[in-house]
Image (tube, helix red, strand yellow):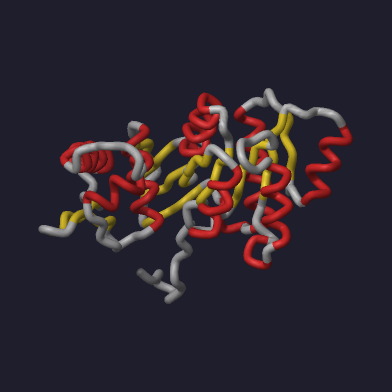
Amino acid sequence: MRTDSGVQPKVTVQPYILVVEDEEALATLLHYNLDKEGCRVEISGDGEEALIRIDEKLPDLVILDWMLPSVSGIEVCRRLRQRPATRNLPIIMLTARGEETDRVRGLDTGADDYIVKPFMMSELSARVRAVLRRIRPGLAEDRIRHGDIVIDRSAHRVKRAGKDVHLGPTEFRLLDYFMQHPGRVFSREQLLNAVWGSDVYVETRTVDVHIGRLRRALSADESADPIRTVRSAGYALDV
């Protein structure tokens, strides 16, 4: 889609964050909160697995625990900084080590930021946004606009033609994903992987249910339905 001035509209890319944390409860909490921030999140439980995943697909940011099985977080950080492909990869280190010497060691090894456990999720979210803004400004935008629809990720709000649209969390993530790829047709399986995650079993019929809810919410004031059904293919956000 092009605007009247002929300028290609800017589309915000969803940041991909790899969380390397072996404490299951904390990993789940991090996944939930970063997902609410509009990030695509994957979890790795040990350092060796994290290095393999990063080789397979480069994240936009790594949140890295210091104390990990197999390979420590500090060693993971050191190895990443030695590789040309990951030399500038943003890393936020998490640790229970609060001594100044430990902070200095973590930063000297190459971490971009350092957070001591326990910490507030609001603080972590702010640090994540700050690192993304500094390294890749386009990834950290809080607002996405497409036509008369605006998503505000930081406030978790949606407006259409200036009016509030009330969405559940799944519908919010669906709309966010569509708005990052306007006009592109996604199959139900692709939407399941992107919005629910590839490690969660959900029937494809569930996509239709949430698409229906999203449509009703966006068209509540008799506005045109922006979601297009492509027979035998899937769904797209009209351009």
Question: In the picture provided, is 74 more to the left or to the right than 187?
Answer: right
Q: Is residue 168 shown left or right of residue 211? A: right
- Identify the residue at the far bottom of this view: 6
Nearer the observer, 145 or 88: 88
Residue occupying the point 73% across, 52% down:
78
Against 15, is 26 above or below?
A: above
Q: Quadrant of the N terminus?
A: bottom left
Tally the numbered discs. Answer: 0
Residue that appears at 65% across and 52% down: 133
Q: Residue furthest left?
A: 231
Say which residue appears at 29% left-offset and 62% top-offset: 184
The quadrant holding residue 54 is bottom right
Name the quadrant containing residue 92.
Answer: top right
Residue situated furthest front in the rendering = 70
Image coords of residue 117 (percent x, y): 70, 26
The part of the image, by quadrant, that contains residue 173 is top left
In the rendered structure, the answer to whether residue 223 lies left or right of residue 26 reads left
Quadrant assignment for the C terminus = bottom left
Residue 37: % across, % down: 51, 39
Q: Looking at this view, is 88 or 82 the one in front?
A: 82
Q: Residue furthest right?
A: 101
Q: Is residue 178 above or below residue 121?
A: below
* Residue 95 image offset from top left, x and y in percent: 71, 32
Pick the residue in front: 61 or 153.
61
- The location of residue 165, given as percent across then percent down, is 34, 37
As rendered, which of 10 and 62 lies closer to the eye?
Answer: 62
The structure residue drawn at horizontal position 32% and vertical position 37%, both measured from the top left corner, is 200
